[in-house]
Image (cartoon, rainbow, N blue to C red):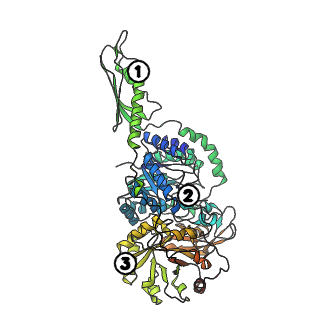
Amino acid sequence: MKRIEILSPCGGPESVDAALRTGADAVYLGARKFSARHNAVNFSDEELFAAVRECHRHGVLVYLAFNTLLRDSELEEAASLLNLACEAGVDGLIIQDMAVYEMSRTACSDMPLHASTQMTVHTPRGVDAAVKLGFKRVVAARELSLSQIKDLCGRGAEIEVFAHGALCMCVSGQCHLSAMIGGRSANRGLCAGACRLPFSAAGKPSERDFALSLKDMSYCRHIKELEDAGVASLKIEGRMKRPEYVAAATDALNRARNGSEADYETLRAVFSRSGFTDGYLTGKLGAEMFGAREKEDVTAAASALPKLQKLYEKTEKRFGIKMTFTANRGEPMLLEVSDGKLCSEVLGEVPEDARVRETSCEEAKAQLSKLGGTLYEADEIEANIGSGLAIPLSKINEMRRQAVCRLDEMRVEKLSAPKRFDGSGLMFVFPHPLIRKHPFLRIRVEQIEQLSKMELRSEEIVIPLGKEEEYLAAGYNPERAVIALPRFDLCEKNTAERLKFVKSLGFSAVECGNIGSIELASELGFRIQGGFGLNITNSLSARHYFFAGLKTLLLSPELKAGQCSRIACPGRLGAVIYGRLPLMLTRNCPIAAQTGCKNCARRLIDRTGAEFPILCRRDSGYFELLNSRPIWLADKLDDFNLDFGDLMFTTETPEQAARVLRAYRSEAEPQGEFTRGMYYRGVE
């Protein structure tokens, strides 16, 4: 069985050496654009080529993080980066946006694709969907237990698991907190870390209240379990971190993989938030998983750095080689060097007859074994020297140097071979219907009771899975309903059984927010609509889902009004135009961790005093942090050239929901606290 891969982060060229010299099998890095760590140093075009060649010389693979959401105006530039990746010979692309998927399949079908953790793949059917799309690898959501990870393995795609580094409170790909509060999108690589600011469930927070901050993860003690589960790759988070951090984390995982104890004290010293947690992997969620960066953590890092710099001073030996040296009278000397896969040969001069003393085989072997500073160590050395020959030891040394350098070059040439890129079939401009659309209203409720005071007309109604019987009992028509599937599904089997029952009740349409739920709904024969969790921000992504069978799509709330209106797709397009937008989807309840369920106030408070409601979806295994103010666009609907707009009712009473519906029908001005969301100010 192939040993589990250690995948190290490289935020800049300096981190490459740190990873290579401490045992990384692969690295992931970003170019200057379209990387989920936009504020890392990242790699220029020239640095990317150099990094790929150096990694390949070491036999280390290189994955390019191409995992941000794109806008239509960026598609052509993204295609140029795809071309560059092919020329550089990278070993795979880590992607989130289905636009990048479509461009890759069209222009460079030989390029291996990895489904980024930003795609929120966390179920067996999510992996199945990725396999059908042609993904070689799936980067699983961080929030899974060992048994849940095991369920993802062996389904046709390699499974990559985060094994060390920072933990976001929010499931990756589903966070809008930074974008809403600071205008910096986590989905575009510019997360401002708003979750690390003070929040509290017990009132206005002190400087030590961090209800949305988790400790860093470390699974060093669980490497054997992950390997036995079928995991292919152990990923270290940290492209924003120093080379010393990369070295420490890579070395720790390498030691753990080899059966040694990881140096947790050094790991904690170089970077941690009040220590480490393995809570997701072990299934032990709760208060013990929370932590923040303390003064002691910062002080410890300063003293640890000099020690860690020594950790990667020397080149790691990566290849055992067999060397065969042959010298016969009247023939050029020959040195053959093989690492088991590649073989280099070097011809030397014709040896001279010995005048005083002949050169022995032992002397030749001693010179050939001097491999310090190279990637090689000699497993076997054979020397065959004819009698009566004198060979200058400097000549043997020179042949040795040439042979191992040639072996390096051969490996680089083999691994860095450019991949074919043909952009002639790519589209960057899409036909847009000339008819101006004014969005129809669509009603989305958290509780069926919220419909009770409304004067309903022909509006489509979106209800959560599990509310169908209550909906029918209230006398509503199942043909008008869309069933919203859980945004995070920890029991896919139960969801499948529930959906079979739902179909028997006469419901035919469901809304899906990730590729796993799309796969499940497709199996069961439902009409599928796309939720905002799919993060559709461009026409190519929208067209991908449309031609996959999703004829109705809810666009990302991180688009501006004009950008929404210019998305070109044959299907029905919509946006959330009212409501408290979900800013985070979390597995841990921040309230229970701080005050306990008995004292639940169903909201968090930030340092400004703003209150952020929490939707408890404990039965489904997750929670949602809502924005402190609702989006209000009733008076701005003419700015949206869309088929529909969602009125998202979460914490509203039936009376409040009815008033909002009436106000939107009359396109009324806002009253009370509200926000325009990101539809006018946009996000970086």
Q: Mark 1 and mark 3: span between their CA atoms? A: 77 Å
Image point (56%, 63%), residue name: 169
Find residue 231 and report its image quarter. bottom left
**Quadrant that contains the C terminus:** bottom right
Name the residue at the top extreme. 355
Q: Mark 1 and mark 2: span between their CA atoms? A: 53 Å
Picture disc at residue 395 = 1
Element type where label 1 sits in the image: helix
Q: Decide: marks 2, 3 in contact (CB < 8 A)? A: no
**Left or right of residue 435, residue 324 in this image:** left
Q: Decide: marks 1, 2 in contact (CB < 8 A)? A: no
Q: Is residue 172 visible?
A: no
Picture disc at residue 189 = 2
Element type where label 3 sits in the image: helix
Query: Which residue is tagged 3?
Result: 500
Dot 1 alpha-carbon crowd within 10 angstroms: few under 14, some 14 to 19, many 20 or more: some
Frontmost residue, 411 versus 362: 411
